[in-house]
Amino acid sequence: MKVLVTGGAGFIGSHLVEKLIEENEVMIIDNLDEGKREYVHEEAKFRKVDIRKKSKVESTVKDFNPEIIYHLAAYNDAMGSIEQPREAIDTNIHGTVNILEACIENDVKKIIYASSGGLSYGEPEQTPTTEEHQLKPVYPYGITKTCGTLFIKDYSRRKNLNYSVCRLGSVYGPRANGGVIKNFFEKLRKNEKPVIFGDGTQTRDFIHVKDVVRGLRKAADKGDGEYNLGNGVQTSVNELLELIEEVTEQDIDPIYKNRWQGDIDRCELSCKKSKNEINWKPQIDLFEGLKKCKRYYYN
């Protein structure tokens, strides 16, 4: 099968390509703003394409003629989107529409879209948060990713395009280009104090990138709709730090700074629908995942 991955030189995309290439012919498109050339799999086709460039997207999809597109390319800096909302809009909305238009013009069978769990649902009314929860996105980043979802659903309704929207928890693991876990480990490796924004009681649903990749692949094979991919466990930033202390056998004295304006208090994703409809559940708990991170960051 021919599979195209946007953002395939990035954190999640490069891990996804590693698995897809085992059974498929894969093309990566990436503008390499956040992705890295060394993350491009040697057996995959590659074009340096910015999804904001409509003609480039259309010609690439036409030339490769994929059956499935995984759409992971995005402006991913949630805090940066406050200062640069147009960057998020151009990439996450206009870029997504360009991908959708190319899907329709070239009879792509299905699009799988990676979105945000915490920042799409916003401050949840209940946890665990299900896919039926109202979308109340926060930050321009969350708003644009939610708009991408709405455009995908509209194209599906009008153009009969199959889709799966996967809302991810806080993804961590090798090659991460951000996130609290990466930041903690890198500070500790340099013998620097990690920074916690706020009092550390805010919770996140941490999910290892390998579990996310399995979920994305399952959603392509079986799902048609919206699916949460998380561990289904709330972990506070303070609790995370205690686990990292245990994993690294270090006493950590963090620096506390003012919390980000608009930051959500809680995130815990319900993954019952993912289990029932696409036969997916996480396999790597946070403690085991942190041990894997230690081996990676301290190598």
Image (cartoon, grey):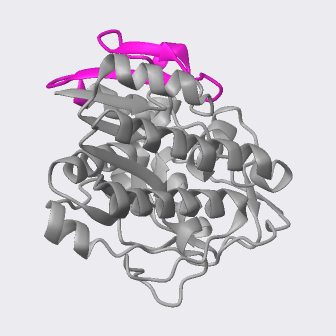
Task: Give above or below for 109 relative to 284.
Answer: above
Q: Residue 277 appears in which quarter of the rendering?
A: bottom left
* Furthest residue in direction top, as rendered: 42
Give the percent coordinates (x, y) of residue 274. 24, 66
| Residue 137 sits in quarter | bottom right
Of 19 and 28, which appears nearest the observer? 28
Report if residue 38 is visible in the image.
yes
> Residue at the spot x=42%, y=80% of the render?
129
Please name the residue shown 17% across and 61% down the image.
278
Horizontal arrangement in the rendering, residue 269 relative to residue 262 (left or right):
left
Residue projecting furthest to the bottom: 125
Q: Position of residue 237 (x, y in %)?
A: 60, 65
Give the camera-side residue of 90 and 246: 90
Q: Is residue 38 magenta?
A: yes
Q: Residue at x 48, y 65 (%)?
A: 117
Q: Position of residue 266 (x, y in %)?
A: 57, 78
| The magenta segment | 20-49
Q: Is residue 146 magenta?
A: no
Give the total number of marks visible in the rendering. 0
Q: Residue 125 appears at what percent x and percent y?
A: 53, 90
Q: Is residue 173 visible?
A: no
Relative to 9, is 199 on the left or the right? right
Q: Is residue 83 above or below residue 296?
A: below
**Quarter of the N terminus within the rendering:** top left
33 over 166 or under it: above or below:
above
